[in-house]
Amino acid sequence: MPFTTALLSCALAAFMAFAGTPKLSVRPRTQQMARHLRVPTGLLRLAGLAEVVAAIGLLVGLFEAWAGLAAGAGVTLLTLGAAASHLRVRDPLAAATPALAAAAAAACVAVLHAVGG
């Protein structure tokens, strides 16, 4: 696996784990975020679980290309949904920018795995 694919996968895995782990808790901040985005707290926790599982999938993708491709595609969809959630409640574009950047990086990871790079 080329260095670029491995580096991008690891960086994206760290981002997804960092973003997902706090959502798994029932802390007041998680509940506040759910209220702000107008989604049930359970759905936000499910999104956090998906983010953590995606991080694991990206790391497995370092050894199995199919897992990297699947994780990259999944993260692309997940983070586009996150960006849409922010825009739906009329957050400024800056609030959706991390999700959009993650979607672009995830799409690159998926493509790199698909072409064997």
Image (cartoon, grey):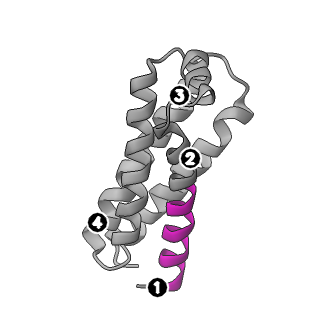
Magenta stretch holds residue 51: no
The mark closer to the camera, 4 or 2, is 2
Magenta part of the chain: 2-15
Element at label 3: helix
**Image quadrant for the N terminus?**
bottom left
Image position of 101 (left or right of 78): right
How far across and down, in percent of the image, does residue 14 sit? Answer: 55, 62
Element at label 1: loop
Mark 1 belongs to which amino acid? Pro
Picture residue at 48% right of the left edge, 68% below the top: 9
For marks 1 and 4, the one nearer the N-term is 1
Between the residue at mark 4 and the residue at mark 3, the CA separation in whole angstroms equals 25 Å
Residue that numbered label 4 is attached to? 67
For marks 2 and 3, the one nearer the N-term is 2
Between the residue at mark 1 and the residue at mark 2, the CA separation in whole angstroms equals 26 Å
Between the residue at mark 1 and the residue at mark 4, the CA separation in whole angstroms equals 16 Å
> Which quarter of the figure has residue 66?
bottom left
For marks 3 and 1, the one nearer the N-term is 1
